[in-house]
Image: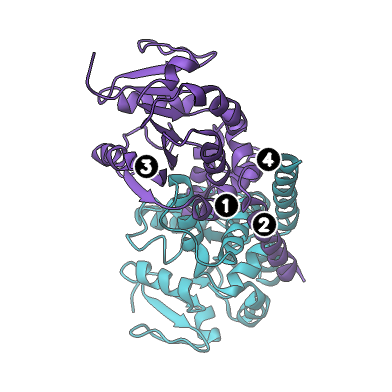
Chain colours: A purple, B cyan
Amino acid sequence: MSSQPRLAIIGFGAFGQLIARHLRDHLPICVCDPVTRANDLPQVGLAEAARCQIIVLAVPLSRLEVVLRTIAPHLLPGALVVDVASVKIRPAELMQQILPDHVQIVASHPLFGPESTRDGLAGHRIAWCPLRGEGHRRAGALLRRLGLRVLCTTPDQHDREMAVVQGLTHLIARGLGEMGPLPDRLTTASFRRLAEAAAMVQADSPELLQAILTGNPHAGPVRRRFLAAAAGIADGEAA
Amino acid sequence: MSSQPRLAIIGFGAFGQLIARHLRDHLPICVCDPVTRANDLPQVGLAEAARCQIIVLAVPLSRLEVVLRTIAPHLLPGALVVDVASVKIRPAELMQQILPDHVQIVASHPLFGPESTRDGLAGHRIAWCPLRGEGHRRAGALLRRLGLRVLCTTPDQHDREMAVVQGLTHLIARGLGEMGPLPDRLTTASFRRLAEAAAMVQADSPELLQAILTGNPHAGPVRRRFLAAAAGIADGEAA
């Protein structure tokens, strides 16, 4: 057996697959997903995944609590559990409440996806909230070696900023999506940037959209502030 | 005297200056503005400007009608009058109503500004609506030689597309502007595009914003459709 820590990816959707692609040359990896199988990585059940040294939770937010309760009794002392959900307050609370004291915890949010990292990870960012233990140091160092910018923050600060960053990007992208086909001939440079931004998040899953819009307690107020400001500008100018 | 046609720029704001910068090596230019003077180009009054072979109207939309009425009696037969306003239905109507039959008319909208053409004109676009006469052919050919993409359209089609392209870009940019300083550390690639788009139009003048939001008859309905769609998405997800 290898002396390297073994890493389990629980949840093999678009993001779980992205993680496997970039980490498989660095660590032995196994995959746990009720539906999607990896082509050439070992497939394991939740209990076996829970007995790895590093466990990455890449499940939808709505599934996180039940997965945590299922793996909790099997986790080894010193194991490092990392979630990658797009919001951080709620996952951080759940992990701290449910996971036994003998495991280490990092709440993380990779600020990229399959679309934006087609040309590689270099220069992309990951929000990093060490919550328990010192295991975040080695894990963070590995991510830096992959070219990522590891940005330490707290779950609350993360969700505050993401309420603007992701909340408004997705809101605007979905709003533009409802306008029908966007003009592509008579366009300005600024509009092309806007349309690019919208296209980049259009393929995101409904689960991700829901997490961003409703799983972040700061998102609603930010969204209402933006819509009121935009409506006010329109009314003001039309008056 | 030169045999080349002389070009008058009426209105020497940000856009008039941009035109002078790019055309001064190709044509003799004079400038007419009640306030702003050109450093090293001849300054003329409205009546003298009106006696040039090409007259570019770079005044705010709110000033267009009075300028047209002032220059109309002085225009030479065969002169080419081109406006550069950001909306086209209203200027096209005014020019066709007010200008004598013996002048040629193009309604145009350069889809760029000082910010987006810092590195030059090449590849940028101009919406081009020939309304009267054949003078648009030579003028269009000159613009193509400068590297521009000259896109022929009608005033109505232009305003329909710009209601989305400029109307929503400016609405979103102003809405984001009201959110206070935007996050710049925990950001996604899509959000950075969005913030870039907003930054590109932030310096635009209040007159331009007003023309875009209220001088385009298609802008209000498009804006309301976008805001309703965005609000509906937010409500739907929150439900």
Which mark, residue A178? 4
At horizontal 71% and vertical 69% (from top left) the residue drawn is A237
Chain where mark 3 sits: A
At horizontal 33% and vertical 43% (from top left) the residue drawn is A134
Kindly report the distance in space between the C-alpha atoms of the residues bearing marks 1 and 3.
28 Å
Label 2 sits on a secondary structure element that is helix
Q: Say which of B76 and B121 sits in front.
A: B121
Q: Say which of A195 and B71 sits in front.
A: A195
Pointer 4 with pointer 3, Cβ within 8 A: no
Q: Between disc 4 and disc 1, whose residue precedes?
A: 1
Which mark, residue A221? 2
Q: Amino acid at mark 2?
A: Pro
Kindly report the distance in space between the C-alpha atoms of the residues bearing marks 2 and 3.
33 Å
Residue A72, x across and y down, in percent? 51, 26
Residue B215 appearing in the image: no
Pointer 2 with pointer 1, Cβ within 8 A: yes
Assess disc 3: are there few (<14), some (14-19) or many (≥20) residues with their C-alpha within 10 Å of its C-alpha: some
Q: Amino acid at mark 3?
A: Gly
Q: Between disc 4 and disc 3, whose residue precedes?
A: 3
